[in-house]
Every structure is written in C-alpha cells, then in structure tokens.
Image: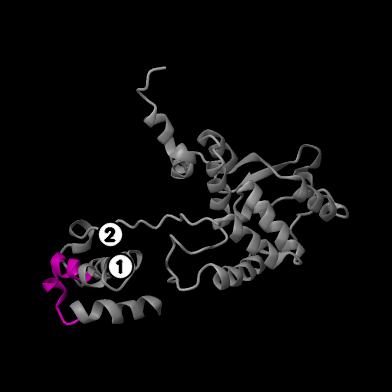
Amino acid sequence: EKIKKSYQNHIKPFIGNKAVNEISADDIKNIQIIKRKVLAERTINALIQIIGAIYNVAIQKEIYKGNNPVNKSVKRINVDNKRERYLTLDEINLLLNEIRYEDYLYVFVQVALQTGGRMGTILGITKKDLKLQSNSIQLKDFKNNTTYLGFYNDELKFLLENRIKHLNVNDKIIDRGQQVIQDRLTKIYNKYFNVGLASDDRKNRVVTHTLRHTFASHLAIKGTPIYTIQKLMNHKDIAMTLRYAKLTPECGKKAVISLYEPE
C-alpha cells in the first residue's frame, strides 16, 4: 500500500503516461532533481528503487524486452544520514528526571548511558552478568556475536544491587520488553528533543540508539583515547569509532600551533 501510494504521488505524474520503452534514464534522473527540492534524499532513493523493481518484474515476466535503465545509468544519491545527535548534560538530566520514578526505565537508560550498549544487549543482561564488586558488567553484542566488558558508577551499582536482590542468577535485570521501553521513551524524545524535526531526519532525531552515541560522544569530549572508546563500544572496525574523534578537546589545535616552536 505504501509503495503504491509513493508511485501514484511521486512517480506516475512524471512517467506514468509514457510507454515503458520510451522512458529514458534522463527521465528518471529528472525525477531525482525535482523531488530533491521537497523530499529527503533517502526517500528519493526509495522511489528510484521502486522504478527499478517495476522494470525487473516486467523483464522477468517478459512484458518488457529492454534493459533496466535504473541499474547502470541512474546513480543513487549519496545520503549523509549517519546518526550524529547526542544528548547534552542538561538533556541527560531532563530525561532522567522525567523517568526517575519508573524503575525499569530509569535503570535501562542509566545502563545505556554508562555502557553504550545497544537495546538488545541491555535487555539481555542477567543477574549473573553483573560483577558488583568491580563495578563491571558482562555484555553480549548480538550484532557482532561477541561479549565484552562494561562499567558503571556507584549510583547505578546501588540501583542494580537493589534490583537483583530477589532475582535468580539467570533472571534478566530489565523485566519489560523492547516495545514497552521503545514506546515510552519515544514519547519523551518527541516531547522534548524532536519538536519540529521531520520523521525521517535520521541525523538529528533522538531515538534510543542516541543513548549509545551519547556515551561515546561524552567519552570523546572528556579526552578518552579513540582506541579505548573502540573497546568500550565493542566496535569491530576503528573506522566506526573515528566519527567521534572530532569531539575530542582541541582536536590537535594546541599541537599544531606549537609544532615548530623551539624547545
């Protein structure tokens, strides 16, 4: 239904009245140019994908004998939509105050902010994964299928200690499902942080994954070495961690300014 609507609203007005073999790559590129003024780049790429899929079906069913003009001639727009948004200290306090009396949510957000774990990682934490004596926690990264170590401060240690008192070793520390947490937090993000932002603005909207970026961003702001951040985030590739390098204090400014001064 969504694809049909996209076709009718954004594709049909441009090429809907042309025979399939009359449509050129330039016609499709023209859609890209015009729609760029009103639609997000990711949405435009989805439209081009729909056109390509229509051609593929026509070729497969032998309705159309030519080549698919989308495959080679029409390049997708390079989308810069990596999440960069992180919460400031004031925003973190605002979020925590909003959920202070919702125990499961408060613990979830605190663990996310202090370990940078993904939602699946945090929801998978059991009592036996906690090492209260050393303020550490065994984390399972389901994306990379690896385990790694996280840490937390004494305030969270106290909360976790109380939370696991009556739990069995294999019981999870968060007793709610992903959807419950997601729905509750999304309402708060939209109320305080996403006002006026487009629903597909990946770069600037606050979502639960923003908590992970907040963890890494504040580590960088504090001057934590990139390799340490990589380890704490459990990034397989250092390139993923280097996006936070620009947040490090001074970014090398002092080193450059004093580079050739005599000692």
Outermost residue on the right side: it is 166
Between disc 1 and disc 2, whose residue precedes? 1
Distance, label 1 to label 2, CA atoms, is: 8 Å
* Residue nearest the observer in this picture, 137 or 243: 243
Residue at left offset 64%, top offset 64%: 94
For disc 2, the marked residue is 77
Is 263 situated above or below 28? above
153 on left or right of 18 = right
Q: Which residues are magenta?
A: 16-31
For disc 1, the marked residue is 44
Amino acid carrying mark 1 in the image: Ile
Total numbered labels? 2
* Residue nearest the observer in this picture, 130 or 158: 158
* Residue nearest the observer in this picture, 101 or 33: 101
Residue 212 image position (x, y, % from top left): 57, 52
Residue at left offset 54%, top offset 38%: 223
Secondary structure type for disc 1: helix
